[in-house]
Image: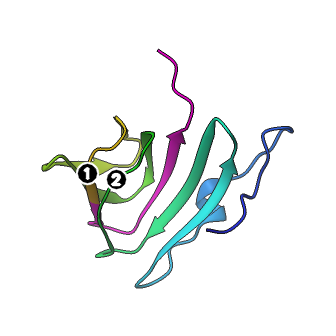
């Protein structure tokens, strides 16, 4: 994956919608931050784009910026729209498909404290 655009050692600012335009017939991702604690990636998916089932070894937070997608975790599908938020424990099987052109922020929490 590409190098992260920003570092946690300094203040950064970006408009995520402007940073990641929808590309016709494609899914585009841009890594924002990759530190010991978190990894953040903004995704832009055109309508009909899919991400097949996969797992992440970290707590995952998804924040939908615009659009609409179906997000399936452990076989249960949730329809997420602009401004929706989802948190998922580590190692859960999940997949998603864009019902409409959609952009979302993915945050993986690498450090876990009880």
The one of 53 and 30 positioned closer to us in this rendering: 53
**Dot 2 surroundings within 10 Å: few (below 14), some, or many (20 or more)?**
few
Note whether residue 70 is visible: no
Q: Which residue shows up at 33% across the image and 44% down it?
A: 91
Q: Which residue shows up at 61% across the image and 68% down it?
A: 1
Q: Residue furthest bottom?
A: 25
The one of 96 and 14 positioned closer to us in this rendering: 96
Note whether residue 30 is visible: yes
Would residue 31 be found to the left or right of residue 25 on screen?
A: right
100 part of magenta stretch? yes
Would residue 5 be found to the left or right of residue 17 on screen?
A: right
Secondary structure under badge 2?
Answer: loop
Which image quadrant is residue 48 in? bottom left
Q: Please name the residue that numbered disc 1 is placed on.
A: 93
Counting from the top left corner in percent of width and height, residue 46 is at: 40, 75
Q: Which residue shows up at 51% across the image and 50% down it?
A: 105
Q: Is residue 44 above or below residue 112?
A: below
Counting from the top left corner in percent of width and height, residue 22 is at: 50, 73
- Numbered label attached to residue 66: none
Asked if the residue at tag 1 contacts the one at tag 2, i.e. Cβ–Cβ closer than 8 Å, the answer is yes
Q: Please name the residue that numbered disc 2 is placed on.
A: 55
* Residue bounds of the magenta highlight: 96-114
The one of 32 and 74 positioned closer to us in this rendering: 74
The one of 38 and 24 positioned closer to us in this rendering: 38
């Amino acid at each position: 994956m590409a190098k992260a655009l920003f570092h946690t050692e300094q203040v950064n600012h970006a408009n995520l919608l402007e940073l990641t335009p929808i590309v016709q017939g494609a899914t585009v991702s841009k890594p924002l931050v990759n530190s010991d604690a978190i990894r953040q990636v903004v995704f832009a998916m055109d309508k009909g784009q899919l991400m097949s089932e996969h797992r992440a070894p970290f707590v995952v937070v998804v924040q939908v910026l615009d659009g609409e997608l179906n997000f399936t975790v452990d076989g249960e599908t949730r329809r997420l729209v602009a401004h929706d938020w989802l948190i998922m424990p580590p190692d859960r099987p999940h997949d998603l498909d864009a019902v409409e052109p959609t952009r979302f922020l993915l945050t993986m929490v690498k450090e876990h404290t009880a």
